[in-house]
Image: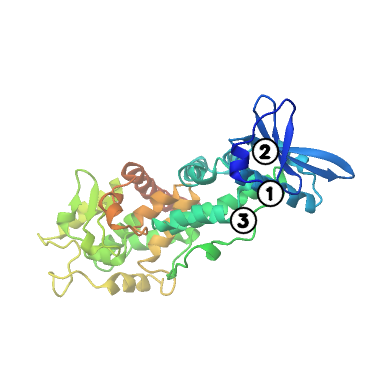
Amino acid sequence: MLTDIQVRSAKPSARPRKLFDAHGLHLLVMPNGARYWRYNYRFNAKEKTLALGVYPDVGLAKARVRHQAARQLLDDGVDPSAEKQTVGKTFETVAREWHTHWMANRHQRHAHYVLKRLEADIFPEIGSLPLSEISTSAFRNAVKKIEQRGALDIAKRVLQTCGQIMRYAVANDLTIHNPVADVKPADVLKPHKRRNYPRVDATELPDLLRAIDAYVGGEHTRLALQLMALTFVRTSELIGARWEEFDTKAARWNIPAQRMKMKTAHIVPLSKQALEVLEKLRRLSFDHELVFPGDVNPDKPMSNNTLLFALYRMGYRGRMTGHGFRGVASTILHEQGWPHEHIELQLAHQERDDTSAAYNHALYLKPRAQMMQAWADHLDAQRAEKKEVKQAA
């Protein structure tokens, strides 16, 4: 078998000569000094030669990888030369072909996000590799890097997207093997336990919104539910809100780190509708520091159960909780095609290390503000649509 030293020191001669490695792999040394990797094999009783690259662009180790892949094709009854057309078809090239094909029936915003995710996390890692050279471990290592920065959901989605791309490649004869076909996110990524909270589905949302608007209990409670629907913060973050946290001129709610589950500051862009609710609450505040003071002790926030019991009285026991608004918003915003990363940041789901915590809370702030306004407009449209249906009936 050849060594790196032998390959590097190979001298040209008057005629082309071959330096053999093993199983038909050899280095063809031309009189002009050019060196080419070649693989001699037999297919259907015919002698054939497959080009595997030019030295030094393709070194000995890479030539052996390509040689082994060609031998595997031969073992599977496939002529390696038939795969030659795919040499040079890198993962990025095929991924972009897949994206053009796949996006035809997808929301433009969602399709844009999927491509941007590939450009940010996958193409720098494996985009330049030919399809036949990408192993399962290459995909695994790429998504593990995403996981390491705390973006577990993105890691899962990217792995699934890579599986779709490779399936497309197999279906269109660009390769014969999908290295991630049988790999599930749970096989390579850390398990992430989620607690499921009762929540209504999208078709029930208009009725819930109208029930909240018509709630005849405490006005603080009704407005709290309206603000929760608009901002989908956690219940503890809502009821503990203080007036000093709100910058109405900038239309922002700045929740300090000590009040957040992840212990990092969080910004909630405020829609016009949310600002209107806050103005109503301001008139009820009587100079309290808390936005939602308790009935018994106004120096303490209202109870967690206040909102839950209000939902019970509206007929939503076992069907909806305060936390359920987060799930409803996440589901609908994803269906509408808003970028997953923007939604996760707004939900304050992503875990952050000490380095990123200083700035991630303000990441994508402008598009998140657009998303929150669109969400508030969607809720208004749901109310109006439901009313029109009832009036027509």
> Which comes before the other along the chain, label 2 or label 3?
2
Q: Are marks 1 and 3 in contact (CB under 8 Å)?
A: no
Percent position of residue 366, x then y: 32, 41
> Which comes before the other along the chain, label 1 or label 3?
1
For residue 1, the mark is 1
Element at label 3: loop
Q: Residues within 10 Å of mark 1 (few under 14, many from 20)?
A: few
Q: At x 62% / y 43%, what residue is drawn?
A: 60
Q: Is residue 194 above or below residue 376?
A: below
Q: At x 38% / y 59%, what residue is drawn?
A: 210
In depth, the one of 117 and 331 nearer the eye is 117
Percent position of residue 387, x then y: 43, 53
Is 335 left or right of 283, judged from the image as shown?
right
Q: At x 14% / y 55%, what residue is drawn?
A: 244
Residue picked out by circle 2? 87
Amino acid type at image mark 1: Met
* Residue at the left extreme of this rendering: 287
Q: Residues within 10 Å of mark 2 (few under 14, many from 20)?
A: some
Count of labels shown?
A: 3
Amino acid type at image mark 2: Val
Is 301 left or right of 31, judged from the image as shown?
left
Element at label 1: loop
Residue picked out by circle 3? 180
Give the foreground label among 1 and 3: 1
Specify the quadrant of the image occupied by residue 374. top left
